Amino acid sequence: MKNKRLSWDKYFMEIAKIVAKRSTCDRRNVGAVIVKDKNILSTGYNGSPKGLPHCDEAGHEMSDGHCVRTIHAEANALIQAAKHGVAVDGAVMYLTDSPCYDCFKMLVNSGIKEVVYGEYYDSRYGSSSKVLKLAKKARIKIRTSF
């Protein structure tokens, strides 16, 4: 009997889900994986800035219904790539949740060419019509993995 292999999209999305388990936010765990030519360049998850208290320890710092204590998974993945001198131009980012507008702007400037997300996160910071309009203008493909 032949084992059914995961598609590349499913494979990288499953890795993003594992990365999300490192999140220190007890409201939502988000993971990101940056991939180029089927190789993982960087990963990131949402959590507090290095050395500062985490949400699951110190509570949430809420502003307009959104916790602002954490750095988003997308930003952390880009930061890790930059910190280690890894170019992400032309790469694909896999996300467990749809990106917010601010993170999507970072993805545009970093040279990410495609975003694949697992779950639509509906909030004013989520994958709004602004994100979709920007994706079209910037010629970045954005799609769900299912």
Image (cartoon, rainbow, N blue to C red):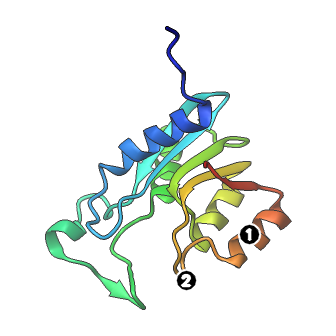
Instruction: Answer with mark 2 or mark 1, whichever residue precedes in sequence.
Output: 2
Figure check: 106 above or below 114: below
Q: Residue at x 55, y 65 (%)?
A: 120
The outermost residue toward the bottom is: 64
Give me the disc on residue 26: none
Figure check: 76 above or below 123: above
Q: Is residue 112 visible?
A: no
Quadrant hosting residue 131: bottom right
Q: Residue at x 31, y 56 (%)?
A: 23
Q: In the displayed structure, does residue 51 sit left or right of residue 127? A: left
How packed mark 2 is, by other alpha carbons closer than 10 Å (few <14, some 14-19, many 20 or more), is few
Give me the disc on residue 132: 1
Helix, strand or loop status at disc 2: loop
Quadrant hosting residue 130: bottom right
Figure check: 51 above or below 145: below
Type of the residue with mark 2: Arg
Type of the residue with mark 1: Leu
The outermost residue toward the front is: 1
Residue annotated with mark 2: 124
Give coordinates of residue 81: x percent, y percent: 52, 43
Q: Nearer the viewer, residue 82 or 64?
A: 64
Q: Nearer the viewer, residue 102 or 119?
A: 119
